[in-house]
Image (spheres, grey):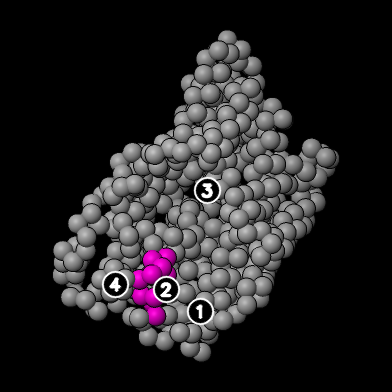
Amino acid sequence: MKLTDLDLIIIGLFFLLMLAIGIYAYFKNSSAEDYFVAGGNLPWWLSGISHHVSGYSGAVFVAYAALAYTHGVSVYFWWALTIGTTILASARVFPVLWVRLRKQFQIQSPLEFLEKRYNLLTQQIMAWSGVLLKLIDIGAKWAAIAILLNVFTGISLPVGILISGGISLLYITFGGLWAVVITDFTQFIVQLLAGIVMFVAVLQYMDGFESLYIIWDQLPPENSQPFNEPYGAGFALAFLFINFLSYNGGQWNLATRYISSPSEDQATKAARLSGILYLIWPLILFFPMWAAPILLPDLLDPSQSYGELTLLLLPSGLVGLVIASLFANTMSMTSSDINTIAAVITRDILPTFSKKLGRGKSSLAIARITTFIFTSMTILIALQYEYFGGILGLIISWFGALVGPIAIPMLFGLIPAFRSCGPIAAIGSIFSGLLTFILTKNIEISSLALQVSLPLIVSAIVYAGIGLIQIKRVPENVKSLLKSISQE
């Protein structure tokens, strides 16, 4: 079943709105600081919403929808609940430290302080590995959006990649972070409307509000359990640690939301808003997915459950709204990633070739050129989707493996208790985490929780262990940096 003309018009208007926002945001940028960190003037409510929607992509409606279909509410407990809990618990810690780093050291990239905290080699290892793997990761996301367009509209994958990637290329290059966060806000409204429409449609199709508790009697008993193996309590604890690192800055684009806040209080309020949204909104968003086994029994491919529900329950026009929300989720994450990666290239990598690059009067022009080139490269990668096959999935999984080992020296390095952890600890942490990841892929481990968390556990142990050995070798510049950002 294909979309109607009205659905296509709504999707087209959504893309045009994204482009219009980029043009509007163009006039809000007069420097690279505006372009990458909104001049440090990002309102807490806009930052909080952007932090929330940039934290997940359309995979929620595909991969997580499949898990909701097969394993019920457990997906909320190990995913949304752990994210919301860890953001709220650390709202007065890392958001505050990121703001202090910008104010005291004028950072525009989440990696910019690493040269002072460790050394240039450590910073460059983190920067290059993250940038190269993000190139593939974002390219894969363009291909994922194109697959959605193909399923619902029949548009070929190359054309779909050029539409979604091309529009994003324009609005990100034009508007920088301001364009990203304003489109994030717009996309959240689209997602909110679409999610509520689907929630109400499912209730109406079934037994009204009574369905909220009646459906569990019609589903397998384990679907109503918070922990449904292999996604048990251990798996949830593993994800709690992973999300603690990711959502406090291990995902670089999320650190940027805090760096861009005008004050510590604003950054904390932004974190709390994002955390509360993670605790509440998924309960509404996932309900149709939890009810899907009743409405769509014996579905051969559970990953199609959300799309099939959309076509089953919604009239013309509203289907287009829901499909636009799927694009919105993925475009929020990709555009957010691109802006932050462009900052890393401009502020951390280019100056190693020439101190003039990324600095001074030409910094805004360099920022836009970097953004345009990097985004274009991700689109070219996406267009080669047929030639990657299993390699693409392998590289994406490697990016996931890198997030934790890189996040540990980034975040732990901001805490005074780890002041003795220097470059050897940071680099050792990264490579030990990667080696452990390789081992987990080649050795059969029965526990999914251990398989997921072992690289991070090893990274953390190596980082802290080397720090204990070097406890008397803390350079004065490191002491000064940590003291300056630890003071109230």
Instruction: Give the quarter of the image for residue 220.
Output: bottom left
Q: Please say whether residue 203 is visible from this viewpoint.
A: yes
Q: Which span is picked out in magenta?
A: 299-311
Q: In the structure shown, which secondary structural element does the residue marked by tag 1 occupy?
A: helix
Q: Which mark is residue 152?
A: 1
- Circle 4/circle 2 CB separation < 8 Å: no
Distance Cα–Cα, label 4 vs label 2: 14 Å
Distance Cα–Cα, label 1 vs label 3: 31 Å
For the N terminus, which image quadrant?
Answer: bottom left
Type of amino acid at the residue the image marks with label 3: Leu
- Circle 2/circle 3 CB separation < 8 Å: no
Could you tell which of marks 4 and 3 lies nearer the N-terminus? 3
Q: Which mark is residue 297?
A: 4
Residue 478 coordinates in the image, percent (x, y): 61, 22
Type of amino acid at the residue the image marks with label 2: Gly
As for residue 310 lying within the magenta part, the answer is yes
Q: Which mark is residue 226?
A: none
Residue 335 is left or right of residue 316, and the answer is: right
Residue 324 is left or right of residue 137, and the answer is: left
Residue most toward the bottom?
A: 5
Q: In the structure shown, which secondary structural element does the residue marked by tag 2 occupy?
A: helix
Q: Main secondary structure of the magenta part?
A: helix
Type of amino acid at the residue the image marks with label 4: Pro
Residue labelled with disc 2: 307
Distance Cα–Cα, label 4 vs label 1: 22 Å
- Circle 1/circle 2 CB separation < 8 Å: yes
Could you tell which of marks 4 and 2 lies nearer the N-terminus? 4
Q: Which residue: 37% across, 85% down? A: 315
